[in-house]
Structures are given as C-alpha cells and as structure tokens.
Image (cartoon, helix red, strand yellow):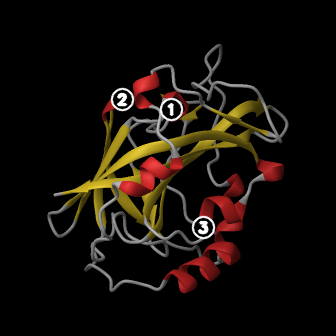
Amino acid sequence: MKGKQSRPGRGRIAWFAAGLTLLALAVALITAGLLADHSPPQPDGDSNNDHTTRQTSDPSKTRTSADAHDDHPAGMKASTPTRLRIPAIDVDTTLMDLGLTDSDELEVPPLGKNAPAGWYERSPTPGEIGPALIVGHVDSASEGPAVFYRLGALERGDTASVTREDGSTAEFTIDDVTDYGKDSFPEYRVYGNTDRPEIRLITCGGDFDDDTGHYEDNIVVTGHLRNTR
C-alpha cells in the first residue's frame, strides 16, 4: 500500500473527464478465476436492458431517490480512504491506492483471498462530492472467494463505512445493486458527476467464460453519504 498525504479536492468536471477517458478500461477490470461448483451471489430480479438490479426483501429498507437526497450531509474535505467495512457481507478490508499502469490502464489490487480492495485515486475520496470508486476481486481459481465475493448479496438500505486518513469516517447507505453486462456497461451512469457524495463498489459477476477466463458482467453497488463522524 502506498503512503500518501491527503490530496486537495478535485473539481467534478476534472474527475468526469478522467473517468470517461480512463475508467472505460474498468469495464473488464477484475480478472477472476472460476470456483469449481461455486458461484458468487448475484443481484436478484428480472433482467432488463442487459442488467439486473437487486430488489430488497425488506420493505423497511426501500428508499426512493427523493428520500436519499433529503437526508444526505454536505460533502467532506478530501482525505485518502484507508479502510472499508460492509457489515451485511462481513467485509472489513484495508484500502490500497490504485492509479494507472505505464500503459495507462487502471491498476487492480493483487489477486488472492486476503488481498485488499482498492480506491481509484483519480476519483473523489469517499465523502467528497462525486462518485468515489472502490474495486475488488470476486474470487480466484487457486484461493477461492476474495474480498468482494458477496458484493452481489447486498440490498438497498445496507450500509458501508469508509475510514479516512484524517481520522474521520464516511458512512454510506446502499441505493442500488446492479449486474451490468460488460458489453453494455454504462460509463456515464457509473462514473458520471453527481451533486452529492456517493460511492461505487465494483467487482465481477454474471457467468464465467471459460474461453476468456473472465466473468461476463460487472456488479456495481451504488450508495450515498448518510452520515459523517
């Protein structure tokens, strides 16, 4: 993990431009190996326009987009994220910084069951206005389930919290869990500017293609900032 100082906040326009130029590469960002006789959880619901969205089984967790906007706090100052916790799926991981490789491709975390998730350092820090991007592997053929193996089991209303380098914590409410085919991945919807602090958690999903050695889809979890401490 790279040690670095909290970076100054970046404008949303700058992030959006970088996002569409560079993060289109993230459509197939997580290479994962098939687990024999085991598949990671997938979002429920009927397929619609090449994507599937999880429908919450608990009506008390259901939130409308208006509700989500009514109670979100103001954006936080920039501070590098250091740890992600998602209680509903037992995720408690440190976060490494992810940049670009020498060939201008998005870096990914190391592959392995104990490997951390990673925050893309050209996206807003979690808690800043805009979409903070965190990615992680789903599994590996040699070591089994990885950090985001159960990401597709999340439901609207679940929570995720990110500890930041300055000692603060950004707490998010999950709004949406969607399985997108990699051939129809909606870059603007996932990476586009937002007017509030949001988070994007991404891993692989769908069926495994033996010929390519990749899953065919990406699971994208979207959440909004609900509290800071």
Taking the image as shown, residue 26 lies to the left or right of residue 67, namely right
Q: Is residue 128 above or below residue 143?
A: below
Residue 90 percent coordinates (x, y): 33, 30
Residue at screen point 61% across, 65% down: 191
Under circle 1, the secondary element is loop
**Amino acid type of disc 2?**
Ala
Mark 1 or mark 2, which is nearer the start of the sequence?
2
Q: Label 2: which residue?
A: 88
Residue 115 percent coordinates (x, y): 41, 45
Q: Label 3: which residue?
A: 106
Query: How far separated are the C-alphas under marks 1 and 3?
Result: 21 Å
Disc 1 crowd, CA 10 A, few/some/many (<14, 14-19, 20+) = many
**Amino acid type of disc 1?**
Tyr
Q: Nearer the viewer, mark 3 or mark 2?
A: 2
Tell me, for residue 149, which label it has, or none: 1
Q: Nearer the viewer, residue 51 or 122?
A: 51
Under circle 2, the secondary element is helix
Whether label 3 touches label 2, CB < 8 Å = no
Query: How far separated are the C-alphas under marks 2 and 1?
Result: 13 Å
**Amino acid type of disc 3?**
Leu
Mark 2 or mark 3, which is nearer the start of the sequence?
2
Q: State the quadrant of the N terminus.
A: bottom left
